[in-house]
Image (cartoon, rainbow, N blue to C red):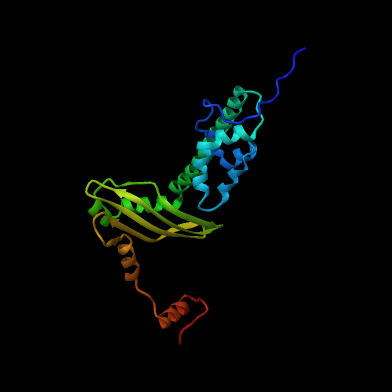
Amino acid sequence: MTSTPPPIMPAAIPPELDRWNWGAFLLNWIWGVGNNTFIALLCFVPGVGIVMVFVLGAKGSRWAWRNGRWDSIEHFKRVQRLWAIWAVVIYLGAIVLAGGIFGGVFYALQHSDAYELGASTLQTNADAVAVLGTPIITGFPMGKISTNGASGRALLNFSATGPKASGRIFLEAIKQNGVWSLKNLRLKVDGREDAIDLLRQSRAELRSFPTLSPPSLRGAARRSNPYFREG
């Protein structure tokens, strides 16, 4: 009949175990609760938490050895190794998840109707072509797009690079009745302080259309009414 050796009642930690503890460093307070090292809860104290993370990495093995009940040195090594492995798995999972979220956001912005409208308008704009040259290559958009059914608003900015120069586009677009239209489209050329209004020509063309005065409108309405007769 074999008897199980009693757990080691630790005093001073063996030199081979007194090393940096990655589980304590990466999982800090979670590791502390799991290893009866409640001093790790100081990570929640503002101004102390960031320092405590490094203290746990340096002294975590010593505290875990003192506060736990271990069957052997190998038992201690195995448990702390598992903490380190789980810490790496959790951090890698968080990085992959965050990358997926940011990647999805960038993909949605780059394939949005507002961005594509701004990019196509830029590449065919005479003022932009004169300054940047052609072809004009646009970069990833930054900003935000908000929609509510058939209406919405977009505020985006993205790089624009051509053979002659490069700059940045600042775009504002609105969505009405399901259709996007540009409200502002400005090009800030690198090395220049002023921004070029790329919608200047279209605004001038809109202003050049004649407008009817109220009497003219009334006359036009009368002439278009089949039941109206002059005299």
Coordinates of residue 115 in the picture (x, y in percent): 41, 51
Number of dots carrying numbers: 0
Image x and y of residue 161, in percent:
29, 47
Near-viewer residue (87 or 65): 65
Q: In this rendering, would 189 be left or right of 29?
A: left
Residue lying at the far bottom of the rendered structure: 231
Q: Residue farthest to the front? A: 11
Q: Is residue 72 above or below residue 195?
A: above
Which residue is at the front of the view, 202 or 225?
Answer: 202
Instruction: Find the residue positioned furthest to the right.
Output: 1
Of residues 15 and 27, the one drawn nearer to the viewer in this rendering: 15
Residue 45's place in the image compared with 7, above or below, is below
Is residue 79 visible in the rendered image? The answer is yes
Residue 75 position, x and y percent, is 62, 24
- Could you tell me if residue 96 is visible in this image? no
What x and y, as percent, mark residue 41? 60, 46
- Comparing 216 with 46, the one in front is 46
Q: Which residue is at a point 43% across and 77% down the rendered structure image?
A: 220
Residue located at (31% from left, 67% from top)? 204
Q: Quadrant of the N terminus?
A: top right
